[in-house]
Amino acid sequence: GAVVSQHPSWVICKSGTSVKIECRSLDFQATTMFWYRQFPKQSLMLMATSNEGSKATYEQGVEKDKFLINHASLTLSTLTVTSAHPEDSSFYICSAGLAAPVRYFGAGTRLSVL
Amino acid sequence: DAKTTQPPSMDCAEGRAANLPCNHSTISGNEYVYWYRQIHSQGPQYIIHGLKNNETNEMASLIITEDRKSSTLILPHATLRDTAVYYCIVRAGGTSYGKLTFGQGTILTVHP
């Protein structure tokens, strides 16, 4: 079946540095990918919709200058957390879908900012 | 998209059927019911979806009431590996590239 690969699975960084998370669709092309954030014991919160070849659409309250999204190809979307701070520590999950109701999700990236 | 209501938690004995309810009283005619689950520290996994009729696949069965205001996800023989958060999501089926919005879900704990 369709697989979404997310890398890295876990990253620790110092406060003030930037971190890039990759999301790849392995055996299908995804014109649209979604980025979620999940804090402990909470549900997934949609951050932005990533569109291949165009600007991402951010949900209300999500800082687009802090969470940079690039979707340069049909199989790769990246999320860069710029100038990360401890409050950005979270579980980040990407998702992609075919022209069907099913969504496929990456395994997630756990970000810890010290 | 229609709002859904799920119990915050449920328990089930291993080998027994797990029946997870979901209320979606404001569902509209073109909206489907989707179920996903999230095992701890993993990304969500698609389980099943339906519009009006009951559906069954290798993972689960979905029972939708005739008025479509509620549904039940059935795991026929729950195992310890089925312990997860189960999310019921209602959204229009035609917007296949649209976003999925997750509620709080039901924490299902399967115990020996």
Image (cartoon, rainbow, N blue to C red):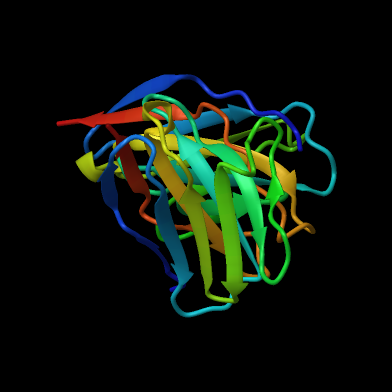
Residue drawn 58% across the image and 29% down it = B22
Classify residue A66 as left or right of residue B8: right
Give the quarter of the image for residue B24: top right
Indicate whether A70 appears above or below B87. Answer: below
Taking the view exactly as shown, the residue that stands out farthest to the left is B112
Classify residue A2 as left or right of residue B77: right
Which percent across, then down, holds residue B26? 79, 28
Indicate whether A75 appears above or below A18. Answer: below
Give the quarter of the image for residue A26: bottom left
Taking the view exactly as shown, the residue that stands out farthest to the right is B29
Which percent across, then down, holds residue A17? 37, 44
In this orientation, which residue lies closer to the viewer: A111 or A6? A111
Q: In the rendered image, is residue A8 in sight?
A: yes
Give the quadrant of the C terminus of chain B: top left
Give the quarter of the image for residue B13: top left
Q: In the rendered image, is residue B54 in sight?
A: no
Classify residue A107 as left or right of residue B97: left
Residue drawn 30% across the image and 44% down it = B77
Total residue callouts: 0
Which percent across, then down, holds residue B89? 62, 40
Classify residue A64 as left or right of residue B35: right
Give the quadrant of the N terminus of chain B: top right
Indicate whether B96 appears above or below B68. Answer: below
Residue drawn 45% across the image and 36% down it = B86
Taking the view exactly as shown, the residue that stands out farthest to the front is A16
Which percent across, then down, holds residue A41? 38, 24
